[in-house]
Amino acid sequence: MASCKQAMVTIQKVKVGKSESYGDVIGFTGEPGNSAEWQLQFTVAGQSETIRFDGVRDNSELVVNKSFIVDLGPLQSLDLGVTGVEIDTSSADDPLPRATFKITPATNWQEGQTFETAAASNPDFSYSVVFDVKCATNFDTVGAALTSDSSSPDRYLGMWEQTGGAWIARHGLTGAQYQAVFDDLVPKGFQPTILNGYSINGQDRYICVFDKLPSAPWVARHGLTGAQYQAVFNDLVPKGYRPTILSAYNIGGEDRYLGVWKQVGGAAWVARHGLTGAQYQAVFDDLVPKGYRPTILSGYTIGGQDHYVCAFEQKGGAWVARHGLTGAQYQAVFNDLVPKGYRPTILSGYNVGGQDRYLCMFEQKGGAAWVARHYLTGVQYQALFNDLTPKGYRPVILDGYNAVG
């Protein structure tokens, strides 16, 4: 029977029971609108991540979605722990009770179970932690490598730059999980700056980055049919909104769309969706001689044929755009342009006929140090993310796609 050499532990969420301490004030309870600030440290096999949560309320859920890649020892077990404090600005912080869990072979964790463990009993605070564990790399009994997660159809690409800012990234989210992240972060001043949808096993998935920054009015939508997308577009554009993010994907053989629109001015622009490869090329050939260039471009497949959603703006600069590339063709374009001072500004992966395809745009410009990768498994993507983030890199392009079809 195969055992696991490397595991991926994902802390999904924290379910809060009681969120505040009221000290020795007998009979005092919080008002329904009261909230607290928590700082939690999640530790898995010696790896730690500290996250602060504002607006913590009784009987609420805190979205975490933090993954740890763990090399397992001979016993094939590992420990998970959660500690923290309620932040008190007027006195000393109040410690939260500790939650612990030991993952062992008896739990069948290598099959991807979801677990929930409650914090120790405490009169002031209560919470539980929900997490899942899956095998990142399987080995047979004699140690020969069998699989990583290469059998999973999801693949990821991205570009990271060594720049700052307050940001949060998530990948592999279901529609409900993405909505929960959105509902948690937007009231805290975050907004989506990267958002792409894709399909895995017929279900929609999302990859995103939220940034905390001031902004003009904005609107975001996901999971739209073509008609719903057009209705949103028709409503917002006359009000001065323009798309800053567009993505399309296939759910059950039908196209679905997401978008973010901002109420800002700028150069003249044109947007199109539902285009076949030939139609996209015709739009491209019409607009580029008029001084337009792609600023948004996403590829997807309907009925076995590649389709595109795009936006063009009337702006200059040295740039090169390609679509419908195989992995080898994309790598050849990359290898040709990067030594000439170009860097990717648009990347998208999609599937045509069971094969991965890529579109890209490169611009000849300077900037911060950067790293780009494509065709990563979920584990490889998380490992790269975990390697680059402590070095000051942040994602500026991310996409998920189906490598099988």
Image: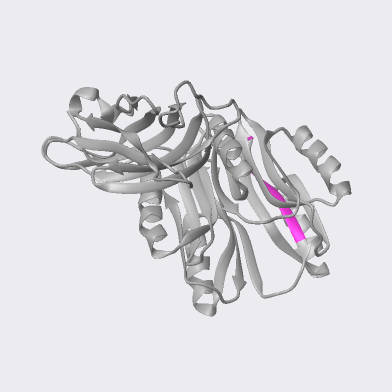
Q: Quadrant of residue 187?
A: top right
Horizontal relation, residue 319 to residue 75: left or right:
right
* Residue 377 in view (yes/no): no
User: Who is closer to the viewer here, 348 or 280?
Assistant: 348
Q: Position of residue 23 (x, y in %)?
A: 41, 32
Q: Which residue is pictured at 60% across the width and 47% down the height?
A: 195
Q: Position of residue 194 (x, y in %)?
A: 59, 51
Q: Which residue is pictured at 38% across the width and 55% down the height?
A: 384
Q: Position of residue 320 (x, y in %)?
A: 63, 68
Work out which residue is located at the far bottom of the displayed protein and give it.
340
Q: Position of residue 389 (x, y in %)?
A: 41, 58
Q: Which residues are magenta?
A: 303-312
Horizontal relation, residue 310 to residue 265: left or right:
left
Work out which residue is located at the far top of the displayed protein and give it.
27
From this view, report whether residue 325 is shown above or below residue 352: below
Horizontal relation, residue 397 to residue 118: left or right:
right
Horizontal relation, residue 93 to residue 239: left or right:
left
From this view, report whether residue 277 is shown above or below residue 234: below
Colour approach in the figure: one colour
Q: Is residue 332 magenta?
A: no
From this view, report whether residue 339 is shown above or below residue 55: below
* Residue 394 in view (yes/no): yes
User: Who is closer to the viewer here, 223 or 251?
Assistant: 223
Q: Main secondary structure of the magenta part?
A: strand
Work out which residue is located at the far right of the displayed protein and give it.
238
